[in-house]
Image (tube, helix red, strand yellow):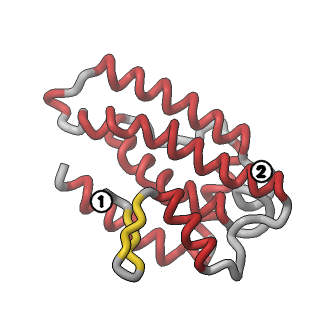
């Protein structure tokens, strides 16, 4: 199962569970915000991406080969993806980051998934996933510019590109 984290000979699969494990194992500096409602918002963003956005990628992966694409399935997945992006936009915070002014849990939860999503759907003509979504556009630009995420962006994008080239 990917992703997976191994610690002391035990394996923890699933992105959100890994993120919760890391927050528990290394509570300082905290990724989750201090206020309970902000914590809920950060977790909700991760759930939206995990349950609704990433769920659509299976259709795109199965249709990567242009000669055997099912256009009906692709169009349905595009519509569902755009709806889910709209839901994510609705629950994004107004600050520089997903929930507030500090890089945190919400950002770490959704950024890698959205990087993968953008790379995959570009093969299907979706080149501006956040068109018309002011908060997501602002957040995406912030995440790209943040020096703390710069190395991750470069490394993860290379990994995504290599992965997709084998499909």
Q: Looking at the image, do the residues carrying marks 2 and 1 touch, with CB atoms under 8 Å apart?
A: no
Horizontal side of residue 140 vs 117, given as left or right = right
Vertical placement of residue 92 versus 102, above or below: above
Vertical placement of residue 104 versus 135, above or below: below
**Residue pictured at 41% horizontal, 78% vertical:** 7
Vertical placement of residue 70 versus 33, above or below: above
Q: Looking at the picture, tell me which residue is in the foreground, 159 or 125.
A: 159
Q: CA distance from mark 2 to mark 1?
A: 30 Å
Identify the image quadrant of residue 163.
bottom left
Q: Circle 1: is it few (<14), some (14-19), or many (20+) Cα within 10 Å?
A: few
**Residue pictured at 37% horizontal, 65% vertical:** 4
Looking at the image, which residue sits at the far right?
35
**Residue pictured at 34% horizontal, 26% vertical:** 74
Q: Percent x, y for residue 128?
A: 51, 42
Q: Percent x, y for residue 55?
A: 43, 37
Q: Percent x, y for residue 146?
A: 63, 72
**Numbered badge on residue 127:** none
Q: Secondary structure at mark 1?
A: helix
Q: Percent x, y for residue 140?
A: 61, 56
Query: Which residue is tagged 2?
Result: 93
Q: Looking at the picture, tell me which residue is in the foreground, 102 or 140.
A: 102
In the picture, the quarter occupied by the N terminus is: bottom left
Q: Secondary structure at mark 2?
A: loop
**Numbered badge on residue 161:** 1
């Amino acid at each position: 199962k990917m992703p997976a984290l191994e610690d002391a000979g035990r394996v923890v699969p699933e992105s959100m569970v890994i993120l919760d494990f890391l927050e528990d194992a290394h509570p300082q500096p905290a990724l989750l915000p201090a206020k309970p409602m902000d914590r809920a918002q950060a977790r909700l963003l991760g759930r939206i991406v995990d349950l609704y956005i990433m769920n659509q990628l299976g259709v795109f992966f199965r249709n990567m080969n242009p000669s055997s694409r099912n256009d009906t399935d692709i169009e349905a997945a595009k519509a569902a993806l755009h709806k889910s992006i709209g839901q994510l936009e609705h629950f994004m915070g107004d600050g520089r980051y997903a929930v507030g002014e500090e890089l945190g849990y919400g950002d770490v939860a959704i950024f890698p998934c959205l990087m993968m999503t953008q790379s995959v759907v570009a093969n299907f003509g979706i080149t501006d996933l956040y068109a018309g979504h002011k908060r997501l556009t602002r957040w995406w630009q912030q995440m790209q510019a943040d020096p703390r995420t710069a190395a991750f962006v470069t490394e993860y994008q290379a990994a995504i590109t290599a992965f997709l080239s084998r499909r």
